[in-house]
């Protein structure tokens, strides 16, 4: 069995966690200075923007490899709590600036979506 190493984060709210709690995972790095305390009860994984727009849930964190400015529009439309770029993907400057303007937290991780989801599940999400 694969050994997972991360800071232990325990949710006091059951199946709902705060972004500030999730951002404490060792493998997540905040890319902008935006941090909110939104409740997070779901994770959405997807790269086809039209599908994410149609199926994403409010308050989710979105895991994607898409890095262009259109991800910010989709995140705003769905009222996502944050965008996490997986596999060391980082957004371009235009995307970062628009996220800052709209107050959308952006994070990155070296992990793939499945590995990050395993960690999030283990900490209570």
Image (spheres, rainbow, N blue to C red):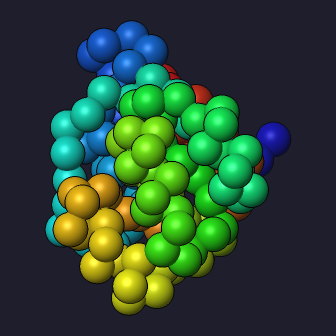
Q: Residue furthest right?
A: 1
Q: Nearer the viewer, residue 16 or 12?
A: 16
Q: As rendered, which of 58 and 106 lies closer to the eye?
A: 58
Q: Is residue 104 left or right of residue 49?
A: left
Position in image of residue 50 (x %, y %)? 70, 50
Q: Observer-nearest residue: 112 or 27?
A: 112
Please tell me which residue is depicted at 38% across the width and 19% down the height of the picture.
Answer: 16
Vertical position of residue 5 compared to residue 32: above or below: above
Tell me what residue is drawn at x 44 percent, y 30 percent.
58
Q: Residue at x 38, y 39 (%)?
A: 79
Q: Where does the N terminus fall, quadrant-wise?
A: top right
Residue 109 visible within the image: no
Q: Position of residue 84 (x, y in %)?
A: 49, 58
User: Left or right of 5: which side holds 49?
Assistant: right
Q: Is residue 33 depicted above or below 119 in this figure?
A: below
Direction from residue 23 to residue 4 in the image, left or right: right
Asked whether 9 or 57 is in front, the reply is 57
């Amino acid at each position: 069995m694969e050994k997972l190493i991360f800071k232990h984060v325990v949710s006091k709210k059951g199946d709902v966690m705060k972004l500030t709690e999730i951002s404490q995972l060792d493998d997540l790095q905040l890319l902008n200075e935006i941090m909110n305390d939104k409740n997070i009860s779901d994770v959405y994984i997807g790269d086809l923007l039209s599908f994410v727009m149609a199926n994403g849930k409010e308050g989710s964190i979105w895991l994607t490899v898409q890095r262009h400015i259109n991800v910010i529009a989709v995140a705003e439309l769905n009222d996502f709590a944050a965008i996490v770029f997986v596999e060391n993907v980082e957004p371009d400057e235009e995307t970062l600036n628009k996220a800052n303007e709209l107050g959308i937290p952006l994070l990155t991780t070296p992990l793939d979506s499945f590995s990050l989801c395993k960690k999030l599940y283990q900490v209570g999400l």
